[in-house]
């Protein structure tokens, strides 16, 4: 079992930056792949970024490449978001699962993750 708690959301002007954190509990955190997803009102949950258990592989949605950076340490996963745009406004969720030996496609797919945080709101004003 892994419990996830996001933090770091808030209100920021366009062009600004935020750093989201996701604290994970559980002794097996280091064996889990971690992902960030977001969901805007009236839209489906979409992939943002993911990182493998070792941290050696990182994956990004095309629209986030160059602006967002995912990283992790022994107990948290982070999402550094720069050059934020109003269209980045959403609730951001972190997710975890064990994808050892799985195709990289698993990282991009919300329903492949078993564990989710409660989400943190990010609002970007124009």
Image (cartoon, rainbow, N blue to C red):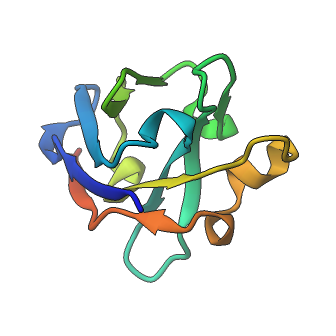
Quick check: 82 left or right of 115?
A: left
Quick check: 114 left or right of 38?
A: right
Q: Position of residue 56 (x, y in %)?
A: 66, 16
Q: Position of residue 55 (x, y in %)?
A: 58, 21
Identify the residue shown where x is 64% and y is 50%.
98
Q: Residue furthest bottom?
A: 42
Quick check: 85 left or right of 98?
A: left
Q: Residue furthest front?
A: 27
Identify the residue shown where x is 65% and y is 41%.
61
Identify the residue shown where x is 69% and y is 36%.
62
Up/down of 117 relative to 8, above or below: below
Q: Residue furthest left?
A: 11
Quick check: 79 left or right of 44?
A: left
Residue 123: tell me if it is visible. no
Q: Position of residue 109 (x, y in %)?
A: 70, 61
Up/down of 67 relative to 50, above or below: above
Up/down of 66 relative to 59, above or below: above
Up/down of 33 relative to 115, above or below: above
Q: Position of residue 15 (x, y in %)?
A: 28, 26
Q: Examine the image and state in which quarter residue 53 appears.
A: top right
Q: Examine the image and state in which quarter residue 29 appears.
A: top left
Residue 38: tell me if it is visible. yes
Identify the residue shown where x is 42% and y is 62%.
1
Q: Compare residues 27 and 12 and report the one nearer the observer.
A: 27
Number of numbered discs visible in the structure rendering: 0
Q: Compare residues 25 and 80 and report the one nearer the observer.
A: 25
């Amino acid at each position: 079992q892994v419990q996830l708690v996001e933090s770091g959301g808030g209100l920021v002007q366009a062009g600004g930056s935020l750093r989201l954190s996701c604290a994970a509990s559980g002794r097996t955190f280091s064996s889990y792949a971690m992902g960030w997803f977001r969901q805007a009102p009236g839209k489906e949950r979409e992939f943002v970024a993911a990182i493998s258990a070792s941290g050696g592989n990182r994956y990004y949605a095309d629209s986030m490449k160059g602006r967002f950076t995912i990283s992790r340490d022994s107990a948290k996963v982070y999402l550094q978001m720069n050059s934020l745009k109003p269209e980045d406004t959403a609730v951001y969720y972190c997710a975890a699962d064990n994808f050892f030996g799985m195709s990289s496609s698993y990282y991009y797919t919300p329903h492949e993750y078993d564990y989710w945080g409660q989400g943190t709101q990010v609002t970007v004003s124009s």
